[in-house]
Amino acid sequence: MQSHPQARSRNMLLAVAGVLLLLWTILTIIPLYWMLVGSLQDSAASASFRPAMIPEALSLAPYERFFAKTAAWRWLFNSLLVSSVLTVTNVFFASLAGYAFAKLKFPGSNAIFWILLSTMMIPAQVTLIPLYILMVNTLQLQDTYTAIILPTAVSVGNIFLMKQYMSSLPTSLIHAARIDACGEFRIFWRVILPLAKPGLAVLAIFTFVASWNEFFWPFLITSSTDMRTIQVGLASFVFAESTDFGAMMAGATIGALPMMILFFSLQRYFLQGITIGAVKG
Amino acid sequence: MKRKSLLLSMALLMGVTTACGGGGGSKTAGPDDKDTVTVWTYPVYGEYETELKDRVAKFQNEHPNITVQTEMLSWAEGPQKFDVALNAGNPPDLYFHSVDGTYVNTKLALDLTPYMTDEIKNDYLPGTLELGQIQGVQYGLPLYQFQWGWGGNKRILDEAGIDWKKIQSEGWTWSEFEAAAAKLTGKTADGAPQYALVTDGSSLDFIEMLSRNNGMPDVLDDGGKFQWNDQRILDTMSFIKGLLDSGYMPKETAALDPTKRTDMFYAGQAAIISKAIPYYDVMLATRNKDIDAGTVKGEKINFVYLPVPHNDNAPAKTTTGGEGYVAFKQKNDKGEQHAKNTFMVMEYLSDAEAGSASNQLALPFVRKSQAEAFAGKELGSETTLAAAEKMAANAEMPVTLKLDAALAAKQKQFKEQVVKPNMQALYSGEKTPEQIADDFKSKGSQSFGQ
């Protein structure tokens, strides 16, 4: 029996899409594979312009050099601490603000929300120097965890995300809680937060990933080796005329590992994050 | 409740205002008072970080009231960090760099004249102290005098039959280079492309060195006259375009960074790289030893230090300059004693023992005491040192040493905002040399009023 022409063209399209997606996947994986292979080869081999995709000999020497010659454990600890604290502060403050903007009626709420949103239009480069002046010259917080954490303790983007998410939650539940004499914070804590868990999870993951990968601000505000995060520490492998690529790739692999674990274990939430706020409830 | 919040807000506001305004009127500090001097520097050579730590510890033992806080920056991002700190009015006391008109423009560069004793001045070799000056005012103490040439792979040059010894002693022209480039371009043993010349697309050294060898000292000359507005810059651009079109330089040049340039040199994919100092001799000798010991894999490379080719009708010029520590004060000035302490640390980090930098980099010493301390311990092969000496005869000093600070700042801005994107466009084939020359002319006339 001959297949329907429409079904045939659909199958053709699916096959083309499949091939394109496969190519895209390979292109995406190559840098990661290069990083992994580079971390398991000696420096000279991994520094080649066209790296050997199938290494002749594997070596853990770059990992040994990375841990022996640097304060890698300290950098990893710093990254973990900073990312964790920022995740907690962002989840807490952004959900509070998001709830207020989405569900509470107070004078000027729209104006405040739009003012906050408009700050997202200002490029980070513009605020960099004033922020540096505030942190270093005024508050004298350079080279401290506080200085790394404070400027992004809550971001407007996250407030916006939570506002959109919380708008989709049923307001009738809040009214019911009020009738039962529940206070505003209790409503937020007992009613809203449990319902907002998927949104909060997305927020937490995105914040953790962004904080883990942040380079310039921690680099700018820290001065001692012990205060560096893993991303800042990795940059110290680049010298003027030579780079220990093996050790750098080993560091990059170690640095990327928590993100990979996080992604694969919480893949569901990552995908949810793409559509969050896309449809207003 | 409302009143309580109002009081709390007022208290907070007062706290912040006090913090903002505080610190300006500090009492006069004495020579024995505790002080901290901050130093931002770079890994100048392989062992610099370790040596600096040892030296700082020794200094602090001798001067227990002074704490020296050093920070080792990465070459790629360090300048950005310094720019932010400088613009925020809070630069470190000492920063490793060449002196720059933009620093003077901020009025935060520290004039060292009051601290320069005759003993210090007389210790500097002729022409070297000027490398730390802007219009005759001393802002920095040079640690070494750099000299930029090109670096060749001896095996590839020999195999192509290039008489590099003749080039080292007599120099070469652009047409002679093009003839050599044709022989140097091909394939490596493992089938990868081998280029005659590899440069990076991110910095401006290449165009600066070539234009200098076509009769233009810089974008401006030392009298402030705009130079990159005539046939000379068009010829320079056309020369580069020709090298790209002939396949003598990689098509991916726009995407290459300095590290990748060096990596290609190590991998035998670059016969010549566009920026080298005699230090390569020392660095490659160490690498060759590591290869012999089996700790590093790869081909052993012998270094050939080459002069930059010059246009057939322009004289050869060697790009030189000085790098070392530049002193700064902060917007919230810490006083005269702090400035004195800063200079004391600066002089200590630039003294005879600090000659190790010139020695390691196989560059000429800047101080008599350094030359004496390292006499007989010079690193670098005789051939390279002889080539460096020959090239030093054509040395072209940076115009920024004589330029008015405001003009120097404008030149820097022109390079960043006009030259850099245009060079990227040239490397990627988005613009022709003619379009770029026209752009230089029109934007230069806007910037410099000429």
Image (tube, coloured by chain):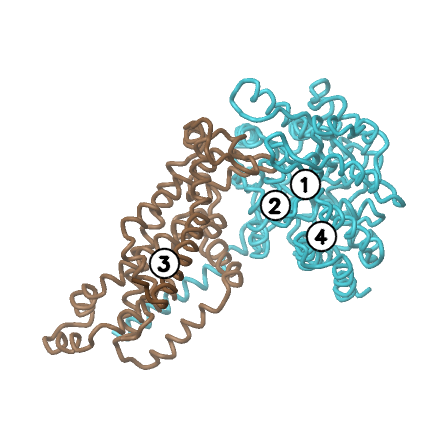
Chain colours: A brown, B cyan
Chain hosting mark 3: A
Residue B67 visible within the image:
no
Position in image of residue B2 (x %, y %): 28, 75
Residue B249 visible within the image:
yes
Position in image of residue B37 (x %, y %): 55, 41
| Residue B402 position (above or below residue B439) | above
Q: What is the CA distance from the residue labelled 1 to the residue labelled 2?
A: 9 Å
Residue at mark 2: B256
Q: Quick one: SS at disc 4?
A: helix
Hey, which residue is sitting farthest right in the picture? Answer: B313
Position in image of residue B1 (x %, y %): 25, 73
Q: CB of mark 2 within 8 Å of CB of mark 3?
A: no
Q: Nearer the viewer, mark 4 or mark 1?
A: 1
Q: Residues within 10 Å of mark 2 (few under 14, many from 20)?
A: some
Between A27 and A5, the residue placed more toward the observer is A5
Position in image of residue A132 (x %, y %): 50, 56
| Residue B355 position (above or below residue B417) | above
Same chain for marks 2 and 3?
A: no
Q: CB of mark 1 within 8 Å of CB of mark 2?
A: yes
Q: Could you tell me the amino acid type at mark 4?
A: Gly
Image quadrant for the N terminus of chain A?
bottom left
Same chain for marks 1 and 3?
A: no
Q: What is the CA distance from the residue labelled 4 to the residue labelled 2?
A: 29 Å
Q: Residues within 10 Å of mark 3 (few under 14, many from 20)?
A: some
Residue at mark 1: B198
Chain hosting mark 1: B
Q: Nearer the viewer, mark 1 or mark 3?
A: 1
